[in-house]
Image (tube, rainbow, N blue to C red):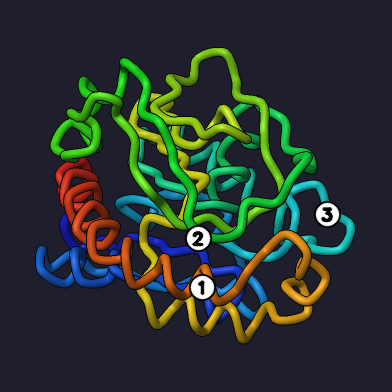
Amino acid sequence: MMNKPVAVIRHIGVEGLGTIQNVLAERDIPYIYIDTWKDRIPNDAADYRALIILGGPMGVYEQDKYPFIEKELSLIRKARDAKLPVIGICLGSQMVAQALGGRVYKGGTKEIGWYDIHFTAQAPHDSLFASVEAVKGNPATMKVFQWHGDTFDLPGDAVVLAGSQLYANQAFRIDTIYGLQFHIEIREADIKAWIHEYKAELDTLKTSIDVSMILEDTKKYSSLLNKTSKQVFAAFSGLIL
């Protein structure tokens, strides 16, 4: 197990590991990117010690357009059967929900920018979130970065750890498998890159999304988010080692 890498499923080049990369490097945990636009999705999880599934602009329900999606869902199920730690971020969380018995669909409103999430009563008892300062607050809320329009219903065995005003399912756990709808891994430079990459989408949302406000909020909140990311992924690393 010790010499096996973490498999990092990447759906678009601009959405990488972000702050997670530093945590893995500090703990000498090897990883490999599997890029869905050019690499074959593995048939099973036996060659890996964990899965990290990143974000992307596609929808889980677009399997006709993106044939890799069904293979990715299968890999998640095989990782569960092998009892591997898994964490999915944004699209990755939707993949996890769908793979394990939930349903992904378009949400009513896009969350793009900085939004409050509220932690549930289960979060202080969770191995990933127990050390997060915001979880101990009253109320237990935190600003996080979001960029999604899809949401999901969860399978019955999921433990919900956080929600937001618009979307009840923002973080969940099934055994050692986690889904985070928000982008805990993102850095200020990444946000600027996404604003450039997804300019066409933002142009259609000018009446509801203020890019200058996103950048202003990023200066306010990114430092705390990066600190929280390190805490969460240090705890996740404990599941891997």
Mark-to-mark CA distance, 2 and 3: 17 Å
Q: Residues within 10 Å of mark 2 (few under 14, many from 20)?
A: many
> Which amino acid, by three-letter code, is at mark 3?
Glu
Q: Secondary structure at mark 2?
A: loop
Q: Nearer the viewer, residue 38 or 47?
A: 38
Seen in the picture, residue 132 relative to 102 is either above or below; the reply is below
Q: Residues within 10 Å of mark 3 (few under 14, many from 20)?
A: few
Q: Could you say where residue 217 lies in the image, as x and y percent from the top left?
A: 42, 65
Q: Could you say where residue 116 lies in the image, as x and y percent from the top left?
A: 44, 42
Question: Given contact means CB atoms under 8 Å apart, are the residues at marks 1 and 2 in contact?
Answer: yes
Q: Residue sitting at 40 percent across and 44 percent down?
A: 86
Residue tagged 1: 15
Mark 1 or mark 2, which has the lower sequence index? Answer: 1
Disc tally is 3
Question: Given contact means CB atoms under 8 Å apart, are the residues at marks 2 and 3 in contact?
Answer: no
Seen in the picture, residue 125 relative to 149 is either above or below; the reply is above
Q: Nearer the viewer, residue 66 or 193?
A: 193
The picture quadrant where one finds residue 131 is top left
Q: Residue sitting at 36 percent across and 28 percent down?
A: 119
Q: Secondary structure at mark 3?
A: loop
Q: Residue sitting at 21 percent across and 41 percent down?
A: 239
Q: Residues within 10 Å of mark 1 (few under 14, many from 20)?
A: some
